């Protein structure tokens, strides 16, 4: 039996990083006389958890027993509530959250902050997704495409962003995105599946097509292992999923008589467990005990590239000759060293002449000496890698930006030369680029979001750096805003309840509709237009929520009542126009511009359920002034009392004319009354 081990099997960079951080935290806490624990399992592998417990790292279900312990946030993150609880308890928190999980959270929170709706394709009960969801207000989360489509259908006008649990299958996420798009919705897709996960899934798909059966190694709670099992089974090959060697039915596999068997493992599976399974299968095929050296040789084949040796001699010299295939350089060896094109840069498309000219300084690592050809070979790539790796590691740990050059456009992103090979996904470039090839040769500032120890490579992001710098600038600009300050701004967005005014880059304030003018404004669009320059006063700041309240009307003196309307007398009858209907009454504008409220109880003697049942905007009405509050400019009006007053005035006029007409006899009055009654 031939055993084929997937190169990507085992710990991903995020899990390895979490284990290293947790192990260091446990050792430090122990040396300082404290305990150390994780909130739930650090990774989804029981064997690894047990090993970490032996090193002093406990696993707690909650914070009730956390006193005196440092707390490590697991690789899948935790909720906002739990994190705040830990900080409120004064605990030292060590964050081992996978950078890809943090990216998912930041993408989602940023989209919601801009008023959009987040769609996450994933398991709501999974710790990664429940943790991310705690930072959101109203996301749509499901693994069921139909459930997601129904949820988007009932939110007309929403802007959707489709994201994914980091262990999902990209093709599945894209199908959900296309489904929402086909509904005619405003939808955007950003790939938040971990690159290592995508690589692992693709390799599993390829490997399953070349073998007779597959063994998938991983814990029962591991989502990414579950995906690998699904992919392997979809190929039609017999698939065995086990957590470790003890669960592997070696007898059944032996009886099946497979000629070729493939093995891969989830991102949380330790190397030791993989080696045990590989050894068992190899011995089954060879029918003999394998030596540890033979096992190590087999296991090492899964590594794509051996790490650069740090004991290579690194030297600096001058370029003497540049051809299409190589560069020759004088580094003091007596004869020029030869640096082949593929050892100058990672790019397959960049020519040596684009990088160097005779006389340029070059630093290389001396490699093999070919005695027959009398040629000393050297590598700029490896020389750069030796120093660049330490630099990149320091930048990753500190979060500092690094500079590099885009040297190649590849599928779904670009390759950045940092002295080591770095991959920048298209979604992390920071702007939409139709042809990624146009970026080759550009210098970029990026942040390292993942390091790959085995390959001495990195995943970088210009977008993450831009977002950090934007957030920093926003924080600095927010500090410039003080209550009482008068600022110039631009109307960025108009809503029914007010307008958002851009004060500084990244800093908006809300101008509520009630603060636009001393006179009533029905809708901000009556007064404001997007892009309009306005002067506003800061009237309140909520630092916790980073919200700023603004006013335009407070920049002018509050008008006295008589400048808003004609002189009004309480008890007087006036003409007016209905300008607004509310559930509690109607606002009527009087001559001169003053507005008063006719309460629903003052519309008619008959019971009125809603003002709009008997009144309409624009209707001319007679009203009686019930009261005038000169202090706040409020006027109480009555339509029904104005009608009563009008009827009384008609009667009084009639009686007055009747008294003056002394020629009418009592008999005449009786006759008039009888005629009136007949009508």
Image (cartoon, rainbow, N blue to C red):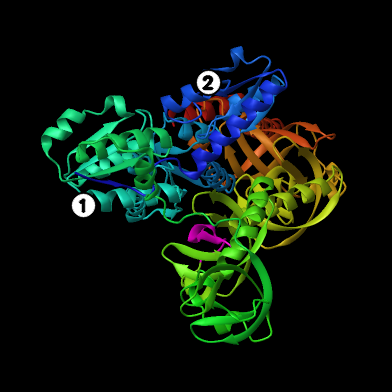
Q: Which residue is mark 1?
A: 209
Residue on which disc 2 sits: 53
* Mark seen at residue 568: none
Image position, residue 409 (x, y; %): 47, 69
On screen, residue 299 above or below 423: above
Q: Earlier in the sequence, mark 1 or mark 2?
A: 2
User: How crowded is the residue under tag 2: few (<14 C-alpha within 10 Å), some, or many (20+)?
Assistant: some
> Which marked residue is nearer to the observer: mark 1 or mark 2?
2
Residue 3 in view of the camera = yes
Residue 40: say if magenta: no
Asked whether 426 falls inside the magenta stretch, the response is yes
> Which residue is painted at 64% across and 39% down in the image?
587
Q: Position of residue 565 (x, y in %)?
A: 79, 46
Question: Which residues make up the magenta segment?
Answer: 420-432
Asked whether 14 or 39 is in front, the reply is 14
Q: Dot 2 lies on which element?
A: helix
Residue 448 position within the rendered picture, expressed as x and y whole percent measured from the top left: 60, 53
């Amino acid at each position: 039996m031939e055993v084929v081990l997937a190169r990507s099997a085992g710990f991903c960079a995020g899990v390895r990083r979490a284990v290293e951080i947790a192990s260091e935290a446990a050792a430090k806490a122990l040396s300082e006389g404290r305990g150390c624990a994780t909130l739930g399992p650090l990774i989804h592998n029981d064997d690894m958890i047990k090993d970490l417990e032996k090193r002093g790292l406990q696993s707690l279900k909650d914070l009730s027993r956390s006193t005196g312990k440092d707390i490590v946030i697991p690789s899948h993150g935790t909720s906002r509530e739990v994190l705040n609880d830990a900080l409120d308890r004064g605990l030292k928190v060590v964050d081992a959250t996978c950078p890809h999980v943090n990216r998912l959270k930041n993408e989602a929170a940023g989209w919601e902050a801009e008023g959009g709706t987040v769609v996450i394709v994933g398991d709501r009960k999974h710790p990664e997704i429940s943790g991310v969801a705690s930072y959101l207000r109203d996301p749509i989360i499901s693994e069921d495409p139909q459930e997601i489509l129904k949820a988007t259908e009932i939110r007309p006008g929403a802007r959707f962003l489709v994201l994914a649990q980091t262990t999902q299958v990209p093709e599945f996420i894209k199908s959900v995105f296309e489904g929402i798009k086909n509904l005619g919705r405003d939808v955007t897709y950003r790939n938040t599946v971990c690159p290592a996960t995508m690589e692992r899934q693709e390799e599993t798909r390829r490997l399953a097509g070349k073998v007779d059966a597959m063994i998938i190694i991983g814990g029962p709670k591991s989502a990414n292992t579950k995906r690998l099992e699904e992919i392997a089974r979809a190929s039609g090959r017999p698939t065995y999923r086990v957590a470790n060697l003890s669960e592997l039915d070696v007898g059944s596999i032996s009886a099946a008589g497979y000629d070729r068997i493939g093995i891969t493992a989830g991102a949380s599976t330790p190397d030791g467990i993989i080696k045990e399974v590989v050894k068992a299968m190899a011995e089954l095929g060879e029918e003999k005990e394998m030596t540890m050296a033979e096992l190590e040789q087999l296991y090492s084949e899964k590594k794509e590239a051996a790490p650069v040796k740090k004991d290579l001699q690194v030297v600096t010299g001058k370029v003497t000759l540049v051809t299409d295939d190589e560069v020759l350089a004088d580094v003091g060896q007596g004869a020029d060293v030869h640096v082949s094109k593929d050892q100058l840069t990672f790019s397959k498309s960049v020519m040596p002449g684009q990088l160097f000219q005779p006389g340029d300084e070059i630093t290389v690592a001396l490699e093999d000496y070919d005695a027959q050809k009398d040629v000393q070979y050297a590598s700029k790539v490896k020389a750069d890698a030796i120093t660049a790796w330490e630099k990149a590691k320091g930048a990753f740990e500190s979060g500092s930006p690094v500079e590099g050059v885009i040297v190649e456009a590849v599928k779904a992103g670009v390759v950045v030369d940092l002295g080591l090979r770095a991959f920048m996904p298209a979604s992390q470039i920071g702007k939409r680029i139709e042809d990624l090839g146009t970026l080759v040769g550009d210098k970029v500032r990026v942040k390292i979001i993942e390091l790959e120890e085995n390959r001495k490579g990195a995943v970088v992001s210009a977008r993450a750096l831009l977002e950090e710098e934007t957030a920093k600038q926003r924080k600095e600009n927010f500090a410039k805003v003080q209550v009482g300050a008068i600022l110039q701004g631009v109307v960025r967005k108009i809503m029914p309840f007010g307008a958002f005014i851009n004060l500084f880059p990244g800093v908006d304030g809300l101008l509520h509709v009630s603060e636009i003018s001393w006179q009533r404004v029905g809708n901000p669009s009556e007064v404001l237009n997007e892009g309009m320059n306005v002067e506003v006063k800061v009237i309140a700041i909520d630092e916790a929520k980073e919200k700023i309240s603004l006013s335009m009307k407070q920049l002018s003196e509050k008008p006295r009542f008589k400048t808003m309307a004609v002189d009004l007398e309480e008890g007087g009858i006036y003409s007016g126009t209905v300008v607004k209907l509310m559930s509690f009454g109607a606002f009527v504008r009087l001559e001169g511009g003053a507005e008063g409220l006719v309460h629903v109880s003052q519309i008619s003697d008959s019971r009125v359920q809603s003002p709009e049942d008997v009144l309409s905007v624009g209707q001319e009405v007679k009203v009686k002034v019930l009261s005038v509050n000169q202090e706040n400019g409020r006027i109480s009006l009555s339509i029904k009392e104005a009608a009563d007053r009008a009827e009384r005035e008609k009667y009084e006029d009639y009686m007055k004319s009747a008294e003056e007409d002394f020629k009418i006899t009592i008999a005449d009055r009786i006759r008039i009354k009888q005629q009136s009654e007949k009508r």
